[in-house]
Image: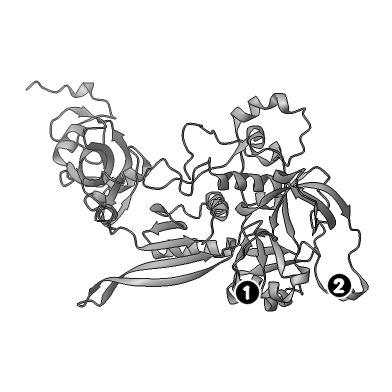
Amino acid sequence: MEPINFQQLTPAQILCCDCGIIIEPNPTNTCIACLRRNHDFTENIPRESIVHFCKKCERYKIEDLGKWVACELESKELMFLLLKKIKNSIQHLKLIDVDFVWTEPHSRRIKIKVYLQKEIVGGAILQRDVVIEFVVHPLMCDDCHRREAKNYWKAVVQVRQKVSHKKTLYFLEQLLLKFQAHSKCIDIKPMHDGIDFFFLKRDDAEKLSSFLESTVASRLTKSKQLITHDVHNNTYNYKYTFSVEIVPICKDDVVCLPPSLAASLGNIGPICVVLRVTNLISLIDPFTLKVAELNATSYFRSPFRSICYSNQLTEFTVMDLDKITNDCTNSSKKQCSSARKATKYSLADVYLVKSSEIGTADQTHTRSHLGGILNPGDLVLGFDLSTANINEPNWERYERSHQDKIPDIILVKKCYGDRASRKRRRRWRLKRMDPRTGSRSNIIGDEQDDDYEQFMEDLEEDQTMRQFVEVYKDPKKIQSNHEEENEEIDEPIITLQEMIDDLNIDDDDNMNG
């Protein structure tokens, strides 16, 4: 060993007590290499570990909590999950930093580099870095197990409406899409007269059933079925069913009210037209303009059915009409003052004939609430009572007692031009709700369905109804309809200000809810 020349040492340098190299003074009087060799505080940290991953739902398992969470590669959530697995081995150390080490995505390996510090002899602080490798083991989670065993759902919400068309279900679909009330359901199945929503939790099903009760006139029935019972710890496993029955009344239906119900609604006439159905049923007497609103509780206390649905209306042509300025005679002033009237509509005596019998049939007279929007030559949809065969108890009772007061025709709504031309000029589209099973077919029906076209026309004609629906621009239709913008069209349209333009619509693919 060569002798050390102490004249070469400066006052700020000393010799390492282990290897004898020249170093700067520190509390241990030892070089960094000797410190790392003599004080390896990372030897108890495992260099390999296992993390469980479900390939079905692409979630990782948190061992301590027994939960499964969705994490992307090299995300903060995944880093938190990995650090919890080595928490016990580094809890006596100070964590400075941690990074991901790149690995092949298909290698089933996740590596992280952990930077740690510890105070050693004499108050000196030593920092080391450790690379820990996690092996991804596939493991099916409990939810996927139940799904594969066909026993995956905990609660189901059954929505039913016993009518011959689906217009109310189309409106309900738009409400669900706007407020995302069905976001936590795991499966959606279309049924013959409704939809079934399946949930993993009972609370999520109760939230959807409460939403439906607050948005559409309906009543809720709850039931449960025992699946398993553990006698040792006295635990029960139930499946819950929430049955939501929507009233079988839809917009533009013609109804005949029971006498007691009509009297409780301000002596409104028994024969009414349904203006709209939300959480209340809005009715109008087409002969007196009296309006009334009926909730679900009052309806199911005195139920009634439609004597004519909106898809059973007949097309008539208006030949002449006489508007009525004041219909309150001396004998009916008391009723007029006690009942609420619609200011949007006006009475008129209308003379019309069936569009299919123009030139061969005589004109028919009726009184209508559409006097403010009808003109001679217009087309109107109505219900022909003179040729109808109605099997409804309230109507049969009213027909026997008021044979001389039954009108021949009840007008319901104005018909705006050809349906094909209205569809061609339409510059907007709606979202559609697809099943959770991955099928490309829509839940309720096809867009070429007549009921869906009638629902689209109802949106154009009813501004109040559009407040509950999100309408999206159709860029292709907007570009193709620039040439027709200057044409005068006597049709209700939805303006561009009412449309949402932050959605790209692909004509080839249905939009997912």
Foreground of the two, 14 or 264: 264
Left/right of residue 347 with respect to residue 166 in the rendered view: right
Q: Which residue is mark 1?
A: 298
**Sequence-earlier tag: 1 or 2:** 1
Amino acid type of the residue tagged 1 in the rendering:
Ser
Q: Nearer the viewer, residue 431 or 83?
A: 431
Q: Which mark is residue 363?
A: none
Q: Is residue 295 left or right of residue 95?
A: right
In the rendering, which numbered label is found on residue 337?
2
Q: Is residue 77 left or right of residue 389?
A: left
Residue 79: x percent and y percent? 32, 43
Q: Is residue 356 above or below residue 273?
A: above
Q: Are marks 1 and 2 in contact (CB under 8 Å)?
A: no
Mark 1 packing: few (<14 Cα in 10 Å), some, or many (20+)? few
Q: Residue at x 40, y 65 (%)?
A: 202
What is the residue that sits farthest to the right in this orientation? 330
SS class of the residue under badge 2? helix
At which x and y percent is residue 485? 74, 28
Other residues around mark 2 within 10 Å, as few (<14) / some (14–19) / many (≥20): few
Q: Quadrant of residue 251?
A: bottom right
Q: Amino acid at mark 2?
A: Ser
Front position in the image: 362 or 351: 362
Q: Residue at x 29, y 30 (%)?
A: 12
At 23% across and 29% down in the image, what residue appears?
23
> Compared with residue 248, is residue 491 higher up or lower down, i.e. above or below?
above
Q: Residue at x 69, y 57 (%)?
A: 384
Could you give the CA–CA distance between mark 1 and mark 2, rounded to whole angstroms?
Answer: 24 Å
The N terminus appears in which quarter of the rendering? top left
Residue 42 visible to an observer of this rendering: no
